[in-house]
Every structure is written in C-alpha cells, then in structure tokens.
Amino acid sequence: MGKTNTDSKEIKNIDYGLEKIFEGAQDFLPLLGTDYVELYVGNAKQAAHFYKTAFGFQSIAYRGLETGSTDSVSYVLKQDKIRLVLTTPLNSSSPINDHIVKHGDGVKVIALWVDDCRSAYEETTKRGAKSFMEPTVEKDEHGEIIRAGIHTYGETVHVFVERKNYNGIFLPGFVEWKSDYNPEPVGLKYIDHMVGNVGWNEMDVWVKWYEDVMGFENFLSFDDKQITTEYSALMSKVMSNGNGRIKFPINEPAEGKKKSQIEEYLDFYEGPGVQHIAVATNDILTTISEMRKRGVEFLSTPPNEYYNAVPGRLLAHNHKLNEDIEQLKALGIMIDADEEGYLLQIFTKPIEDRPTLFFEIIQRMGARGFGAGNFKALFESIEREQENRGTL
Ligand code: FE2
C-alpha cells in the first residue's frame, strides 16, 4: 500500500489503504487530535488582531507580563476545534527570539492531544525521538496538565498534551482573554492536515521517522512526475496516524527547469518547517467570500479552461456538484474528485512577508485525497507568484 498514483483506479487503492490503517494501526501512540498549533511571531499582539479580523478566530486566553510571564507573551485564539497560540519574546536573549531571527514568523509547535502524556513521551523517545521537553506537570486551581515534547523536522516540535484532569481555559499560567473586539467566525472547523517541507533527499528519512517513532503509515505518495509543471517539481508522501485524525504530508523539492517552490520555502525559512495548515469548513462559499471581504489574499484563480473541465471530471466519478460552479469560479475555489466523492479547496498567499507559511481552506464532500487533480493548476499559480518575487 501507499505507493500509489493519482489516476482514478489507483485512488481506489488509497481508500483500501486507509481502511487498513484503521484496522491495523500500531497503538503505542494513540492520538486524540490536534491540541494546538503554536506560532512564534515578531509581534503577537498584532498577529492576534490579524487572525481575529481576517480569519475569524476568537479571543480565548492570554499569558504575559500581567500574569507574571516576564520573558514571553502568548495569545490563544480559537475557532471551533482549532486552537492557535501566538507567542512573542520580550527580550533579545530569549531562544524564541533566535527562532524568529532565523525563520521569521512560523510554526514552532504542533501539539497533539493524548490520554497519557508520559507513555507518549516514553514510547516515542525509546524509538529514537530526540527529547524537547520531559513530561512536566503544570497545575493551577482548575487541575493539572501534563506536557512533554519531541523534536521533528527542522526546529519544529511535537508537544503531547494530557488534559483529562484539567478544566481551565487553556493551560495553567493562562488567564481568560476578554476582548471588546470580537469579529464573527468565518466557519473554520478543524485542522485537516499540516504539511512539512524538508530538504533534498530528506522526505524518505522523515517518512521513516514518522513510521518508526510515531507509528504512522504512509497512505499516499506523489512523485515528481505527478507534481510537476513545465518548470518546477516536488515530491510528497502523506503520513497518517492510526485513527486518521492526524495527517502530515511531507514534501521535498525535485529537479526542474526552474526553482521548486519547496526550495524557495527552504531558502526563506532557512531550513525545514511547516509549509501549510489546512483547515476544514462545511461551507467554503461562505467562508471564502467572508475571508476575501476581510482582506485575506488567495492564490490567483485558475483559468476558464480549468472550470470548463470540472463537470467532466466529476461525471467521470459519478458525482454531482452541490455548489454553483459560477460561484466557485468567482471565488477561485478549486474542485477535485475521486471514487468516494469530491473536495473543494483554495490556498492563501503566504501570510507573512517571507514566502513561507500559508493556509489551505478545504471542504470535503466525501473525498479523502489532497486535491491531486489540482496540483498542476495550483503550482502554475504559485509559479506566477514566484516569478513576481524573482525566485523562480
Ligand atoms: Fe494541503
């Protein structure tokens, strides 16, 4: 399983592959879901305003000078099941500062919700994970949290969070953040997947790491023949945990006539890191029209020929589009189909000045893939941006 193609016959195998994951998963690391994603940013106060205004996140919790935190400030934002933590250092000697100097704003922590933190830490470190933080108990009047962490690609870390004995707002040390400014949510529901970019010839190293250390399985692969345009290429393998709630595609650059978008990322992030966070919505038309109104910039819309081909692509799999194609086209939303259904997706431009981290908004209508049928249109759009930046 796993070594699959993107044509329809092979996609069927992908689904069988996923079933197999559900049945035969190694359960040494049961994961309940994504707990939070922490970004290290240059100015958390301003970043929080952006995520509230543009992405519709809600103010949840705060930690800073007023709560006794003298070296960093963190804002916690929430939308349905998605929790973002924005952290900024308060002085130049903080290691958080070093991270920002090197990488710019970016994802530091992908926190995973577990039932037993000590076991998660022990099982992964004994399989070769490098420790970031030993199991640590944090307490306040709302109970206790246990957290531990391990290093993954680049300077990114996974933190295991056990919160079954805690009923506070977020973590001990945080206070409720009450704000007078509360823009409406835009309908973002949960994290569908998070993609990591790693260096040349490193994809299989990290695929093996997720298999060996985390018990994940590779259920979908794309080689450089499939993810290529006239100019640039990349390779990708999708890793999933046993229950399928956590999916981490891993990309590496591939040789092309011009510079791979993955190489551009590695140059500007100065190493491997999180490329995009894909968040799910149940109503992409409303979500995207709202985000566009609020100033979020998306990659340029595919050409007319792309939308002309959509009905045929859906029909080939006997699916009927519930949405109005003209509305999808007007908003630049892309459509892909497989045996089980279809999906709607769109990608933001990078959300910081360095061309590094961006977001994907996805609505799944039965399909469990990642929009392989859109890769060409998507990458041509990214190349237009690279051309403008002079980095193609
Ligand atoms: Fe994605």
Image: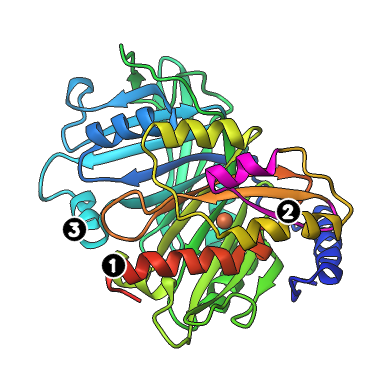
* Depth check, front residue: 53 or 333: 333
Instruction: Please report whichever mark, 1 or 2, sits nearer to the chain's N-terminal start.
Output: 2
Write the residue at 79% across / 46% down: 366
Classify residue 203 by image quadrant. bottom right
Amino acid type, label 3:
Val
Residues in magenta? 324-340
- Between circles 1 and 2, the one closer to the viewer is 1
Write the residue at 34% across / 52% down: 106
Query: How far, Cα to Cα, is label 1 from label 3?
Result: 21 Å
Can residue 271 be seen here? The reply is no
What numbered label is drawn on residue 389?
1
Q: Position of residue 123 (x, y in %)?
A: 60, 57
Vertical relation: 279 (above or below) 353: above
* Depth check, front residue: 19 or 140: 19
* Depth check, front residue: 290 or 103: 290
Q: Residues within 10 Å of mark 1 (few under 14, many from 20)?
A: few
Task: Report whether the residue tagged 1 is closer than 8 Å to ligand 1.
Answer: no
On screen, residue 228 versus residue 255, left or right, reads right
Identify residue for label 2. 242
Q: Position of residue 231 (x, y in %)?
A: 47, 82
Secondary structure beneath label 1? helix
Q: Residues within 10 Å of mark 3 (few under 14, many from 20)?
A: few
What numbered label is drawn on residue 101?
3
Q: Residue furthest right?
A: 318
Classify residue 204 by image quadrant. bottom right
Query: How far, Cα to Cα, is label 1 from label 2?
Result: 40 Å
Residue 335 falls within the magenta-colored stretch? yes
Query: How far, Cα to Cα, is label 2 from label 3?
Result: 36 Å
